[in-house]
Structure formats: structure tokens, C-alpha cells
Amino acid sequence: MKDDEKMCPSSRCKPGALLIGMVKADSTVGHVPMRLEIDEDFVKSANADGKAETRFRFSSPCVEGKCAQWSGDKCGVVEKAADKLAATQTEDLPNCSIRKDCRWFKQRQAEACRVCSFVITDNEKSSEHYTESFA
């Protein structure tokens, strides 16, 4: 990863991506505190019971303008989530393995972290990185 490269905290389940969270029973994301790179075996296993993105959150390098969620000069997902979920925010930030490199954190700082647990990746959209379902 390049020094100035930012990580998308809501990308596809693919080899080389980082597993950063798991969807809990209450439809929020529990963050994995360490970086866990996934391989082809994990991808196959995770998709065996349906779309992995509905049960896990993954991160990979942000592709910026090549992503359907890119809006001008920023990620539109975190903007929508922060606006829509403002009332659900807590003071505590999740223990996150990508915060220092996170695209959303770069845009909205702690506000992005506070809504991150409520964002579940929607695998029905056909773009490299995509998110829209808020728990």
C-alpha cells in the first residue's frame, strides 16, 4: 500500500482484501481489531452460505473515481451514512484496524467511525466498492 493510499472500509470479499468486521445479530458490525488479509479459501468458504458481504465487512484500497459511490472528490457512502445516522452515534469509537488509512476517517474523522458499525455492504450493486444498507 502506498503512503498516501486510502482504504475503502466497505469493499468486496476477494483475495487480498482485509477482513475488518462481522455483522452481529443486531445488524451492526463488530470490528476486528487486527488486520486480517483474506485468501481464496476464505472467499470460497465465506460465500458458500450466500453473499459474504452481508455477514462480513472488508477493506481494500479505495479506487476513488472508478467507484459508483464516488461523489465528486469524496466517498458518498460515509456522507449519506453520517447524515442519515447522526442520531445513532455514540461517543466511543470502534477498535479499528484501518483507521489511520481509512477513506471515511479522512473525510469525516470520528463522525465516520461512529456510524461505521451501522453500515452493511450491499452486494447487489455492480461496482467495485459499494454500500448503501444502513442497519
Image: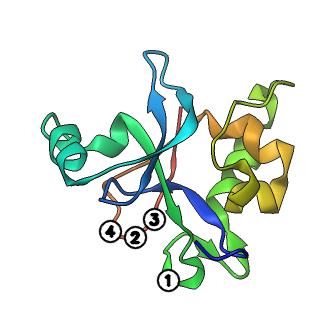
Bin the neighbour count of mark 2 within 10 Å (Cα to Cα): few under 14, some 14-19, many 20 and up.
Answer: some
Q: Could you give the CA–CA distance between mark 4 and mark 2, rounded to whole angstroms?
A: 7 Å
Amino acid type, label 4: Ser
The residue beneath circle 3 is: 129
Q: Which mark is residue 126?
A: 4
Secondary structure beneath dot 4 equals loop
Q: Picture coordinates of residue 78 (x, y %)? A: 68, 54
Please say if the residues under marks 1 and 2 sit with CB atoms less than 8 Å apart: yes
The residue beneath circle 1 is: 66
The residue beneath circle 2 is: 128
Ranked by sequence position, the earlier of labels 1 and 3 is: 1
Please say if the residues under marks 1 and 3 sit with CB atoms less than 8 Å apart: no
Instruction: Tell me which corner region of the image, top left, top right, bottom left or bottom right, holds residue 15.
Output: bottom left
The residue nearer to you, when weighing 5 against 129, is 5
Which residue corresponds to the image point at 19% horizontal and 43% vertical from the top-left? 47
Secondary structure beneath dot 2 equals loop
Secondary structure beneath dot 1 equals helix
Using the image, determine if residue 10 lies above or below residue 2: above
Please say if the residues under marks 1 and 4 sit with CB atoms less than 8 Å apart: no
Which residue corresponds to the image point at 43% horizontal and 15% vertical from the top-left? 25
Which residue corresponds to the image point at 83% horizontal and 43% vertical from the top-left? 111
Q: Could you give the CA–CA distance between mark 1 and mark 4, rounded to whole angstroms?
A: 12 Å
Q: Picture coordinates of residue 91 (x, y %)? A: 87, 25
